[in-house]
Amino acid sequence: MTLAALLAAFIVPLSGCDSHAASTTKPGTQSAPQGQSRAEVFAHVKQMSALGEKLFFDPSLSGSGKLACASCHSPSHAFGPPNALSVQLGGSDMHQPGFRAVPSLEYLQSVPAFTRHFHDSDDEGDESVDAGPTGGLTWDGRVDHGSDQARIPLLSSFEMGSTPAKVAAAVKASPYADDFRKAFGATVFDDEGRAFAAVLESLEAFEQTPQKFYPYTSKFDAFLAGRAKLNDAEMHGLQLFNDETKGNCASCHISQRAKDGSPPQFSDFGLIALGVPRNRALPINQNPNFHDLGACGPERHDLKGESEFCGIFRTPSLRNVATRKTFFHNGIYHKLDDVVRFYVERDTNPEKFYPVSKKGVVQKFDDLPKRYWDNINTDPPFDRKKGDKPALDEAEIKDVVAFLGTLTDGYDPSKDRDAQKGTGINEMKSVAN
Ligand code: HEC
Ligand code: HEC
């Protein structure tokens, strides 16, 4: 067994596809020598993730000295944004706005590496079905490993605005410098590049701590295990979420266990164009020629010029989504019911979401140049036209939002007086059959 495979076996035990999960440790970056025993590798991973945790909370890594990973990825908000801002501020003066919403770092362990053509062995057993572009980390899927990803915010001029040399010097001067030497060798600080790589690797190891990053302790998990019941609104919301003729949400945000029995991730990790409205509150959007096209640029470069990838963003997991106050890649919405309303009324009442000209013409899909409109998804609930009845009415939207609330981790059945009232998983099955 290679070191990478060993590490993967330890740190991604719940992933159904360890061999190509995006966040598994990158082969070839191992800091421990080959030929270590399983116990030694395990101990090294533990050391790295403990260091990773310290790094994650350490603002001294940033150019300003004020911004840590945790400033944007707040542990008390499922490692998502701590506030309702569409985008966070960073950079050397802490005033530089980014242009994408901060995603949650939870449940990334089973995001597959990016591929243009995804063939899911879970998809009703038919591997010939091409699910299209899938996987990779960040909204546009441009990196496959947590270590490569961590490089992005550390060096970005509008995030932590640091350099490998500054990061290495900060760690060398930190209270945990000796632990760092213990984990990576006494000479680790002799070479900036080596120290920086060790920082990235430690952050990745931390992000794969199961209890913190994929605990599976939501009410919905308790429901699936037969330990909690959903109340009427939550149960109705789940049905609407799954129903292909209503929300059809589960077609992308998968709500079923995988074939190997692993819990639902609430994402198929596909990159999809929803035609989300332009967020005119973002400073970068004052430039009418700027468009965040997701996988075809500007942040991602390898698919530039390939128009089929323009406007697509990775489907996020909806676990812990109710802890967020900002939604979609550009953070345009701040309330869950507004997000759900966008899905069901984008095509029936577009004037609610897009600018309307003086002559009354709705400028639909105003954040994507027209030449890419073929990429925009038209599956249900997006299969309607202006004036049709929306797939969900207001009461149904409320129930879907109630169901989304059951995906928040930290549920304690003993504290829920209603846990024994409502519908259990077995009763639900008997209703379905
Ligand atoms: C200024 C706010 C900010 C800081 C600080 C920050 N991030 Fe992020 N993070 C973001 C944003 C915004 C994205 C989405 C980027 C994109 O899609 O281009 C992101 C994406 C990510 C992702 C990918 C998530 C996914 O859904 O694929 C990971 C992992 C991550 N950050 C880890 C880190 C780590 C580790 C640090 C510290 C070294 C860090 N971040 C610091 C804002 C921040
Ligand atoms: C065709 C695939 C697809 C369907 C169907 C779908 N979603 Fe999504 N969902 C996505 C994608 C892709 C994004 C990210 C889009 C973006 O930011 O540009 C997303 C984002 C979201 C978000 C924002 C999450 C965040 O962290 O910002 C919520 C909430 C959400 N979806 C809920 C739903 C609900 C509820 C339904 C059913 C009414 C639904 N989705 C149906 C693909 C889908």
Image (cartoon, rainbow, N blue to C red):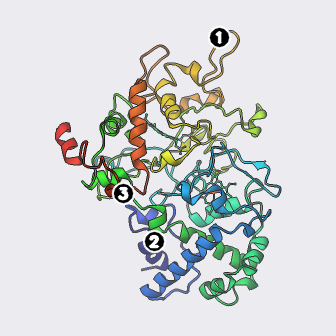
Q: Earlier in the sequence, mark 2 or mark 3?
A: 2
Residue 178 is left or right of residue 78, and the answer is right
The N terminus sits in image quarter: bottom left
Q: Residue at x 42, y 62 (%)?
A: 215
Tell me whether the residue at label 1 lies in contact with that at label 3, contact meaning CB atoms closer than 8 angstroms: no
Q: Which mark is residue 360?
A: 1
Residue 376 position, x and y percent, is 53, 31
Q: Amino acid at mark 1?
A: Gly
Q: Earlier in the sequence, mark 1 or mark 3?
A: 1
The count of marks equals 3
Local SS, label 1: loop
Dots 1 and 2: beta carbons under 8 Å?
A: no
* Residue beneath the point at 64% across and 13% down: 361
Type of amino acid under label 2: Ile
CA distance separating discs 1 and 3: 51 Å
Left/right placement of residue 102 relative to residue 380 reads: right
Residue 6 lies, with reference to residue 117, above or below; the image says: below
Secondary structure of residue under mark 3: loop
Quarter-wise, where is residue 335 in the image? top right
**Front label number (1 vs 3):** 3
Question: Label 3: which residue?
Answer: 412
Q: Is residue 179 left or right of residue 381?
A: right
Which residue is more in the foreground, 56 or 229? 229
Q: Which residue is under mark 2?
A: 11
Q: Secondary structure at mark 2?
A: helix
Q: Position of residue 106 (x, y in %)?
A: 50, 57
Query: Residue type at mark 3?
Result: Asp
